[in-house]
Structures are given as structure tokens and as C-alpha cells.
Image: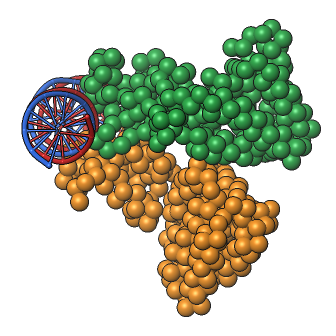
Chain colours: A orange, B green, C red, D blue
Amino acid sequence: MASSTLSRKIANTLSEEILKGDLMPGDRLDEQSLADRFEVSRSPIRDALRELASTRLIEHQPRRGFAVAMIDTTTLRNLYEALGELEGLCARYCALRADAVQREHIRMLHAQGLEAIRLHDMTAYAEANHALHRAIYDACHNDALRDITLDVRNRLSMFHARFLFSEGRVAQSRDEHQEVVDCILRNDGDGASEAMKKHVAKTALNIISHIMPDNRKPMAPAASDDG
Amino acid sequence: MASSTLSRKIANTLSEEILKGDLMPGDRLDEQSLADRFEVSRSPIRDALRELASTRLIEHQPRRGFAVAMIDTTTLRNLYEALGELEGLCARYCALRADAVQREHIRMLHAQGLEAIRLHDMTAYAEANHALHRAIYDACHNDALRDITLDVRNRLSMFHARFLFSEGRVAQSRDEHQEVVDCILRNDGDGASEAMKKHVAKTALNIISHIMPDNRKPMAPAASDDG
DNA sequence: TACCTGTATAATGTCGACATTTATGACTGG
DNA sequence: CCAGTCATAAATGTCGACATTATACAGGTA
């Protein structure tokens, strides 16, 4: 249990808290406070923060410390545009390259999502949704592309986690997923790419439209609106 | 300029040395040696190495330190495939969105490259080449996409620097650039994307073909020395 | 001879303290 | 009452030392 280094475990903990939304964009990460909290010295804290900064979840400015990355609306739009293109590429390569096991896995994850919707289990749907996208990255047979896409998605995860589940959005998202999966299963690279790009674009529109109203502040995700 | 922190200056220095090829993939970065060399303690060295690791130019393994990233042939192919797609996207958006100043800048950089070739000044050509690609990223009007693309290109820069300038490759590259620039200047997004993807693919093929035969040190972590 | 093992060395991980700089706030002058 | 300046304080940057662990080498045994 003490196998990995302290700093890595601390980085993982902080990462989860940011992804979960416990730490909000703009929150400062005070080294001494974190050292007190984890009952270690500042050295492993510094290492953990530098490691986290590599994911761009947090930002570092010399002599001003670390803070959870602030994302303004322009950057948010750019990131979603990039994510759409990247996921489109993953979907395309996935449709063209995925092996039988991977296709079956994707089909099953989509079915799990459908079942979660039927049961109105939004937590299960969120997990299936994430797993489905992840499976498509994995099946694109390009680890570099997968990693890049995953990094962008992680940077946006705090927004996803909060705004994904508005009323009509889930049904829409389900249908979009259906189209992506259909294209992948019939080896339709162009179709999968286009369907995925549209899906991400609509997700982005949904999320940005929720955030735009209180755009005054540098974009901290406001309170969740789902139950 | 002694303004920024020690660690940032050290990171920049090391980054340049890796990009230039002074430090080769697999070279270990000993903290104490670097501390002695820069005449500082290990703390700023550690910070610099963590910062460099965020660019994936170097890798970190717990209790095993830092080393210049090793790139096996599979990863190299994947990175070039990703780079082709990313640069294709940048070229597309550039063709559709670049303003007059940016288009003129791109046209001028291409002309500089042509002039460098006429003068057989390979250093000037390398600079113009890099600046042209960089200008296309900048003109895509998506900073996130630009940063992602630049990161991938930097990870590959050490290979570019070594193998870009084989005999016939420069003329070929020049013609490919010509096509990309022509497409951009006539707002042809699809054409620019396709031309750029082809250009990167041929660059990759050229470099990989140089590396594959004499499978020298930079590559192959698993298949080490029995071949 | 080959392989396992134990020890010794050297590297990274961690710690506490000091130095430097930025930010905060009070005080004075206009 | 507001603006500017100086002083205090708190945070990050840097340092040297100790702790822990991986690596290498020597020694012994099958």
C-alpha cells in the first residue's frame, strides 16, 4: 500500500476531487494547507501539484502557486471543438479498426446505457456513458490519439459531470450514441466520425447554454441542476 | 532575464537541449548531476524535471528518476498519425478562418522557405518550415487545438531535426507546402486538410524509413539488442 | 558455469528551515 | 474621502540533510 510514492497518491486524490467537482475552478491549492491535511511535508505536495499540472487540471504561476484551472467561455468552446474533432477521429478509427471483442464491448456498454435510462438510474448512465466513450478511444488502435483525447475529456469532465443530465438531453444523447454505435458496428468510419462530432457538439451546446447566463465570473460551474 | 524562477529557466534550457538533440531518448537525467551543473540544489531541478515531464519530452518513474522519453516505432507511427490528423485540422480551420494578416504571414513564410532552398540554406529552411507550421496552428483560431498540436510536434521534434533533410525530401516537402498554402489562401478547408495530412504522412514515412533499418538507440525498448 | 543471495552503494523520496517575493493593510498626505 | 507608500505577514522558492529503496557487484552454492 505504500508501494507508490506519496506524491502520486496525493495527486490521484486531488485529481479525483477536481474531477468530482469538490474543488472548483479558481480554487487555490495552498501547499502548507495540503501538507497539513495529508500530514506530510511540502515536498511531496509540490511534486503532486506539478504532476497534476501536467494534466492541465491545475495551473501554476511562478510565485503565485497552484490553482484549479479556470476555463473561460472561449477556451471552453475551443476545447469542445477540439474534443469533437478528436472523438470524431477516434470513432472513425474505431469503426475501421476495432476487433470483434472491442465491438462487442462497445455494443454492450451502449446497451447498459439504454438499460440505465430505462431504470432512470442517472449514475449508472453517467458511468456507462463515460465507459462507452472510453471504449471507443481504446478501440481506435492509436494510444497517442487515445491519450490526447482522454486528456481533453478530463479537462472538461467537471462540466460534464454537472450539466450532462438535463431533462430532454438524456434521450437526445441516447439517440446520438445509438447512431455512433451503429456506424461503428457497420465499419462506417465517415458516419461514425460525423455522428460523434455532432454528439459532442450538441453536448457542448447544452453545457455552454447552461453556463453562459452567469458568465460574469471566470467560469466556475454553478450548482448542479439535476436531481 | 533573471526574472522567472530558477526551475523554469532550467526547464527551458533542458527542453532546448532535448529538442536540439543534445540529449537523446533514453538518456537519464540525474538530479544531483544537474544540480551540480546548474550550481543549484536539487529542489529547482526536481521542479524543472516535473515541468518538463508535463510536455512528455521526458518521463518519470517513481524511484527510478527521469529520462528523456523513449519512443518505440509503434508509438512513433501513432504520434505521426495523430500529428497528421491534428495538423490537418489546423490547416482546415486556418483555411476557413485565418484573417488577411495571417494569410499574408503564411504566404511570406512559405516564400522564405523557397528562398532558403534556392540558397541551399538548410538551417534557414528548417526555421521557415517550423515557422510555417506554427503559423498555421496559430491561424486556426483555436488555442486548445493549437497547443495540442504543438505538443505532439515537439515530442517528435528530435526526429524531425535529425532526418528531415535527406536529398530529395526537401524538394518534395517544398511542393507539399506549396499545395497546403495554395489551399489555405483560396479558403479551401478540405483541400488544405488533405494536403497537410499527406505532407505529414510523407514526412513520417521518410523519417520512419530512415530509422527502421538501423534500429538505433532512440527506439525499441523491448527489442533491444538481439537484432 | 550459471544462478541465487546478501550486502553495499548510489539514487530518489521526504523533511524542516531559511530566503525571497508577493499580497495585505494601515497610515499618511493630498 | 481617496490615493499612494511603507511595513508586516504569508506564501512560494530554495537549500542541505536524512530516510528509503533500487541497482550493482561480490560471494557462495547447485
The residue located at (77%, 72%) in the rendering is A186
Q: Picture coordinates of residue A36 (x, y %)?
A: 21, 52
Q: Picture coordinates of residue B63 (x, y %)?
A: 28, 41
Residue B94 visible at all: no
Most extreme residue toward the bottom is A119
Most foreground residue, B183 or A92: A92
The residue located at (49%, 19%) in the rendering is B22
Most extreme residue toward the top is B119
Most foreground residue, A208 or A107: A107
Most extreme residue toward the right is B186
How many marks are shown on the rendered structure?
Answer: 0
| Left or right for A28, reference A142 | left
Q: Is A23 above or below relative to B148?
A: below
The residue located at (20%, 49%) in the rendering is A40
Most foreground residue, A83 or A166: A83
| Left or right for A122, reference A50 | right
**Which quarter of the figure has residue B198?**
top right
Most foreground residue, A33 or A109: A109
Q: Picture coordinates of residue B93 (x, y %)?
A: 78, 45
Residue B38 visible at all: yes
Q: Picture coordinates of residue B124 (x, y %)?
A: 72, 14
Q: Is B170 above or below relative to A185?
A: above
The residue located at (52%, 30%) in the rendering is B218
